[in-house]
Image (tube, rainbow, N blue to C red):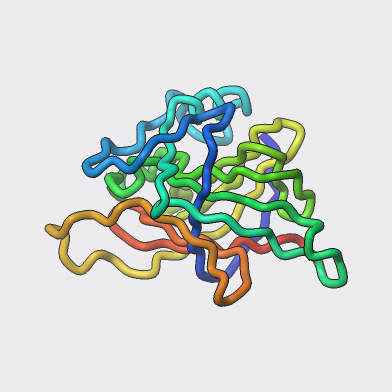
Amino acid sequence: MRFNRQLVVGGVLTAGLVGAIGAAGYGVRHVAEPRPTPAPRFGHLEKASRAEIIEYASQLAFDTSYHAIDTRRLTPAPGKDPRSEPLVTIAPEIGVTALSDADFTGGRIVLRLTASGPSKRYGLAKGENYIWMDQVSGELRAVIIPADSSIALVRQSVRVLHRRLNAKVTAPRAQFRWNDLLQREIIWYDCGGACCEMFWRPPR
């Protein structure tokens, strides 16, 4: 399994998807009380083939309702045409808010990125790409997984913003938003009873 490692100190990730039903994984409307995102059959990401990962993704359901998704054009490299990067829509797996801390020990795909075209700068394929999240040596990590196996996986760092103050409150619905205020590729998501953010930094 090939990885491009991009270590990031922090950031803000709010991801929303205007997701269409993809070749791998399918779209659904918001579910009030979703089941937790299912675990994959393979044990660890590094031991799985890309075909096994995409087969796992095809069994998941991504929320394509209005309040769950968001779309933006990725930021180009300095001096490049603003339209040189694709539009990317983010859609959450419907059960991400029902996951526990323990669920991330083995890892889960938590969202789908649908790109209007390929992006070498961000390591995306045209069409479906996925974000996997797990714990490695006690630390959370996120991995971008293009459905196109010719494109390497890209590792990103994750930080926990805060824990829910009241465990008895209703879990928030899965929502992902691009952080347009900071003009950065930043994604926020629920991660096992906490709010996490991933700063998606492209190579220099």
Q: Is residue 89 above or below residue 58?
A: below
Nearest to the observer: residue 157 or residue 79: 79
Residue at x-position 47% and y-position 63%: 197
For the point 31% across and 49% down, the residue is 97
Relative to residue 160, is residue 111 drawn left or right? right
Q: Residue at x 60, y 66 (%)?
A: 8
Q: Position of residue 66 (x, y in %)?
A: 42, 51
Percent of width and height locating residue 185: 61, 64
**Residue furthest front in the image:** 66
Q: Position of residue 5 (x, y in %)?
A: 68, 53
Looking at the rendered image, the quarter that the C terminus falls into is bottom right
The answer to whether 140 appears left or right of 121 in the picture is left
In the picture, residue 63 is in which quadrant?
Answer: top left
Q: Is residue 78 above or below residue 68?
A: below
Residue furthest to the left in view is 168
Residue 144 image position (x, y, % from top left): 60, 46
Up-down relation of residue 101 to residue 13 (above or below): above
Specify whether 183 is left or right of 204.
Answer: left
Outermost residue to the right: 79
Q: Nearer the viewer, residue 68 or 169?
A: 68
Left or right: 87 as drawn, with respect to 17: right
Q: Residue at left 57%, top 45%? A: 113
In the image, residue 60 above or below residue 14: above
Residue 54 sits in which quadrant?
A: top right
167 or 173: which is nearer to us? Answer: 173
Number of numbered callouts drawn? 0
Q: Nearer the viewer, residue 172 or 154?
A: 172
Quarter of the N terminus within the rendering: top right
